[in-house]
Image (spheres, rainbow, N blue to C red):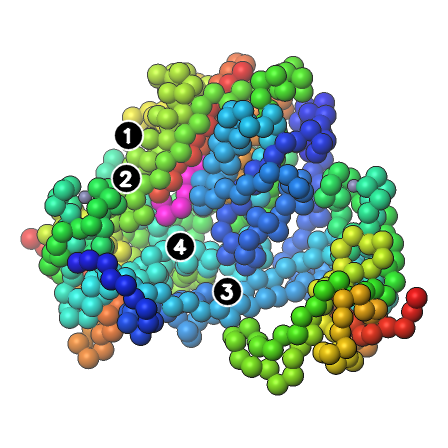
Amino acid sequence: MALDSCGMTLDGIDCVVMGTAPDAFDMIHMKGENLIDGAGAWRKPYMRGFVGGGTGVFVVDQGWYHVASGLFDTCLVVAEEKMSSCLPHPQGAFITIWDQFTESPLGPSLLWMFAMEMTRYMHVHGITEREIAMVSVKNKKNAMDHPAAQLPAEITVEDVLNSEVMAWPVKRLDVSPSSDGAVALVLAAEPAAKRITDKPVWIEGVGWCLDTFYIGHRDLYYPRYVEYAARQAYEMAGINEPSKEIDIAEPYDPFDYKELHNAEGLLLCGKGEAPKLLADGVTQRTGRQPWCPSGGALGVGNAIAATGTMKVAELFWQLRGEAGKRQVPGKPRRGVAQAWGDELQVGTVIVVGI
Amino acid sequence: MSAEKVTQLSQTKRMFGELSFGPQDVKLYGQYTYGIAGERFFREIKDNGRIMGTRCQKCQLVYLPPRIYCERCFAELKEWVEVEGKGRVHSYTAVHVDLDGNRLNEPILMAIVEFPGIYGGFVHKLGEIEPRDVRIGLKVEVVLKREEEREGSILDIEYFKPGMFD
Amino acid sequence: MRNEVGELPGVPLTEKDVLHKKVLSTEWDPKLKWAWDTGIGYGRYLNELKKGRIVGSKCNKCKRVLLPARAFCELCFRQVDEWVHLKDTGTVNTFSIAYTDWVARRIKEPRIPAMIEIDGSGGVAILHLLGAVDPKQVRVGLRVKAVWKPESQREGAITDILHWLPMGEG
Ligand SMILES: [Zn+2]
Ligand SMILES: [Zn+2]
């Protein structure tokens, strides 16, 4: 579909970058290699990038330097995840990501990690579950207009608060589903891009950063690694005031609180201020700075490595004015997308503009 | 504290793990559906006892096992062709140990079997043949399980045996 | 040129389609096991747990206590300088009350994982579980103390600490 949309065939693609998260989901080791035919990488320079949930934006960043370095004119970026093969539940695959000596023996579930981060975020800033639930309401509603959405819904804050407690403070409707999905983007150097389309969307900045593996050495209330990644991308893009110079943001939202947490890391507002922007309607699709107009992971689905790429694709459509019913009004010119993952430790960021 | 050279596993303190939380608990496992091409491929073997591939007109390739897209030109492959189960040994090995390194009583003969004019082939067992008689280029033909035993898996092919054909 | 995502290709499958054999499927249950060498830092950390003690390591350059104890400081990228014995008491930094287990099965009695800042470490936390405590009483800032397995049952593992109990207010 990505190739069709720009009238290209595989002949015009110089290299391929593939994003796919843990092999444990598929229990197919070297799954990057397993996926090359579907990725269009047959006998082409090919690279798999992987930073857990941060992969979706990381692969676009990697595709960018394949092209920006001058090594290739065009790059096909493909990201996918297939979680449905992992039984009895894909969450089990995450038992292997904890520290095998000091954490895994305690039988941790993935939710512990998020729940404890959410608790810390709420505690430090005095934020309530009710304030956070609004993210889920907004994103699932936005997803009603996304043709690939898995869990679009019109729900209320009460619905979220009353949904089953999974790992307090995380409730059923605070969490994105497990998903199968794939996204593809075509990147091209400036001269090639101008031949391919008269409406290019430019990558203006990229950034990525990993914090220490040891979660006990970090204060979970704030993702400083996201901030470092964002600063790298903003500096490249010449952005000084992201809260004003960014028209649309797609922060990573596998859980509702994560959108707020990540938006603060992206410096779209001060620490602890994201719930206020949400409450004031600023981050609605019609607001001053929409967050996750796509519907995000909460609404569209969370096919781990593909989610961040879905967010970059959303910015592409939004900036070209082609987002249909999801279109953000006011001719947006610049957007930031971000993904996040590993053991609460990686931020990957991209700024795109027209 | 300084680094030390360790040459024996017995010198280390080891911790054990598996794809589970504790030995008594459920284990993770994978379940795969075959996809559009795989579904038809395995159903053809199971129900009709025949091996099918898909052809890319543009690249003049017949894919075996079949796929729904050509890996070279991305064309959707809709043309199904039967592949006669008569091929040749492309390469082979005699396996004398199992996955855990235990000695097998009888070696298992494994081969890559290719078919004339076909892009792909099978990695499968050889049967009804002594290890000393296997050679590259050997003509082999498919032996399927009896229909009532077939369940839609690559193991519906029992093995390949030496074949008499031109 | 297409403007919007149009018809999406694909064949939707439900769990029932697979369960009722509407489509073929195959299963794989890997029997693999792993054995990890604990190395110098973690080896000492786990051995000390067996003795009923929590040990960290210290980097004299950045003055940090590393916990669990490790052989090198990832910040200064140098070997650590000494072992430091810490108390088996601490403060809850954050926590959850979990009603699902590692494969998302529902559990009746919740487990309460917490990040516990270990006294003497300068605020470094370890992941562990609170035990025998009313979930309603758990809060960030709660003071807790380790409950150890009887010495004869310890094996040099993080589970040598059974869980952590509130120390009582004040
Ligand atoms: Zn072709
Ligand atoms: Zn240091």
| Mark 3 or 1, closer to the camera | 3
Residue density around tag 1, few if under 14, some if 14–19, many if 20 or more, within 10 Å: some
Query: Is A122 in front, or is A26?
Result: A26
Which residue is label 1 attached to?
A: A271
Q: The residue under label 2 is which amino acid type?
A: Tyr
User: Quadrant holding ligand 1?
Assistant: top right
Q: Residue at x 54, y 65 (%)?
A: B29
Q: The residue under label 1 is which amino acid type?
A: Lys
| Mark 2 or 3, closer to the camera | 3
Marks 3 and 4: same chain?
Answer: no
Q: Whole-Å distance between the Cαs marked 3 and 4?
A: 14 Å
Q: Could you say whether the residue bearing mark 2 is in a helix, strand or loop?
A: loop
Query: What is the number of the mark on residue A97?
Result: 4
The reply to whether dot 4 and dot 1 touch (C-beta < 8 Å) is no
Q: Residue at x 80, y 74 (%)?
A: B161
Region in magenta = A339-344
